[in-house]
C-alpha cells in the first residue's frame, strides 16, 4: 500500500514538473502610440481676449461612435467596415486621449476663466460634450487620408437645453500608408480638429460672457 502511495506521489511530481515547462501561446508584441498634436501657445495675460467675466467650462468625456471605443487603430477600405491594425495600439481609446487635449485647447484660447475635466467639484457655466463620429484612416484609389470627426455640443450648466452644437471634421491627406504614417496623420488631424473646436467654444464663450461692469456714459444727468 505504501509502495502504491509512493508511486502515485512520484507520478504526480513528474506531471507537475512537466506542466512547469509547458508555455502558453506567446503574447503579441504591440507597438503603442499616443496622440501628441502640436500645442497652441497660451495667450498673453494682457491680451484683450483675457478679460474678467469669462465663463468656466467643464469638459466631459467624449462619447465613442461604433468601433472607436477601443485602443485599436482603425482604418477602412473605401466605404467598407472598420478594420484594425494587428500589432499597433493607441495608449488609450481616442475618447480618453482627447479629454486633456480638449482641456488644453480651450484653456489656450483665453476665453475661459477656468477649464476643468469632468468629474470635478468645480462649478461651471458650460459643459462641453462631444462624440467621436470618425477617427480612422481611409484607403482610397486616389490616395489615403485620415478622417477625424467630432460632434461638439455646448450646454449651459444646470439647464437641459443645448446652447449650440456643431460637427467638426478634418480630412488629413497621407503620402504613404502604414501604422506609423497613420499615427502621424492622426496627430496632424487632431491638431486641426482641436483648433476648430477651440474657436467654436471661444465664440460661444464670447456670446455668453458675463458683463464686468455697467456701461458708463459721458453725458451728464
Image: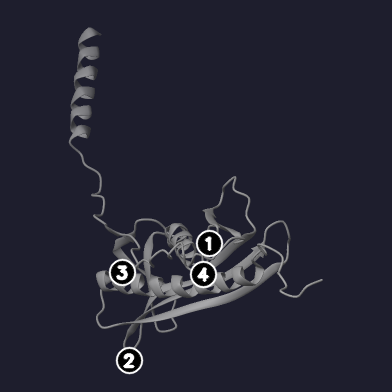
Q: Residue at x 22, y 29 (%)?
A: 15
C-alpha distance separating marks 2 and 4: 45 Å
Q: Are marks 1 and 2 in contact (CB under 8 Å)?
A: no
Please report contact status of discs 2 and 4: CB closer than 8 Å, yes or no. no
Q: Is residue 140 left or right of residue 59?
A: left
Nearer the observer, 107 or 195: 107
Mark number for residue 183? 3
Q: Whole-Å distance between the Cαs marked 2 and 3?
A: 20 Å
Is residue 170 toward the left or the right of residue 212 in the image? left
Which mark is on residue 62?
Answer: 1
Nearest the camera: 159 or 214? 214
Q: Position of residue 199 (x, y in %)?
A: 51, 74
Residue 183: quarter of image: bottom left
Looking at the figure, which quarter contains the C terminus?
A: bottom right
**Earlier residue among tags 1 and 2:** 1
Would you place residue 8 above or below residue 153 in this image?
above
Mark number, residue 48: 4
Residue found at x 73% / y 66%: 161
Q: Residue at x 41, y 81 (%)?
A: 171
* Residue 25 or residue 31, whichever sits in front: 31
Q: Position of residue 50 (x, y in %)?
A: 51, 64
Q: Nearer the viewer, mark 3 or mark 4?
A: 4
Crowd class of label 2 (few under 14; some 14 to 19; many from 20; radius 10 Å): few
Q: Earlier in the sequence, mark 3 or mark 4?
A: 4
Would you say residue 184 is visible in this rendering? yes
Mark 4 or 1 closer to N-term? 4
Q: Which numbered mark, 2 or 4, is in the foreground of this view? A: 4
Crowd around label 1: few <14 · some 14–19 · many ≥20 (10 Å): many
2 or 4: tag closer to the N-terminus: 4
Q: Residue 55, percent across and down? A: 61, 60
Residue 119, image x, y percentages: 56, 48
- Residue position for label 2: 142
Amino acid at each position: 500500500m505504501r509502495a502504491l502511495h509512493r508511486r502515485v506521489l512520484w507520478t504526480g511530481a513528474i506531471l507537475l514538473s512537466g506542466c512547469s515547462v509547458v508555455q502558453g501561446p506567446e503574447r503579441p508584441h504591440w507597438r503603442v502610440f499616443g496622440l501628441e498634436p502640436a500645442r497652441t501657445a497660451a495667450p498673453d495675460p494682457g491680451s484683450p481676449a483675457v478679460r474678467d467675466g469669462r465663463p468656466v467650462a467643464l469638459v466631459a468625456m467624449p462619447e465613442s461612435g461604433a468601433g472607436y471605443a477601443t485602443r485599436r487603430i482603425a482604418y477602412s477600405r473605401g466605404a467598407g467596415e472598420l478594420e484594425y491594425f494587428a500589432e499597433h495600439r493607441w495608449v488609450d481609446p481616442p475618447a480618453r486621449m482627447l479629454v486633456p487635449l480638449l482641456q488644453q485647447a480651450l484653456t489656450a484660447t483665453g476665453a475661459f476663466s477656468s477649464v476643468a475635466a469632468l468629474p470635478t467639484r468645480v462649478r461651471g457655466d458650460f459643459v462641453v460634450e462631444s462624440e467621436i463620429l470618425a477617427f480612422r484612416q481611409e484607403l482610397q484609389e486616389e490616395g489615403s487620408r485620415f478622417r477625424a470627426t467630432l460632434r461638439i455640443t455646448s450646454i449651459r450648466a444646470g439647464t437641459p437645453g443645448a446652447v449650440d452644437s456643431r460637427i467638426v471634421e478634418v480630412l488629413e491627406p497621407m503620402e504613404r500608408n502604414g501604422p506609423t504614417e497613420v499615427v502621424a496623420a492622426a496627430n496632424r488631424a487632431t491638431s486641426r480638429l482641436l483648433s476648430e473646436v477651440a474657436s467654436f467654444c471661444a465664440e460661444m464663450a464670447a456670446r455668453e460672457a458675463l458683463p464686468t461692469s455697467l456701461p458708463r456714459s459721458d453725458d451728464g444727468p
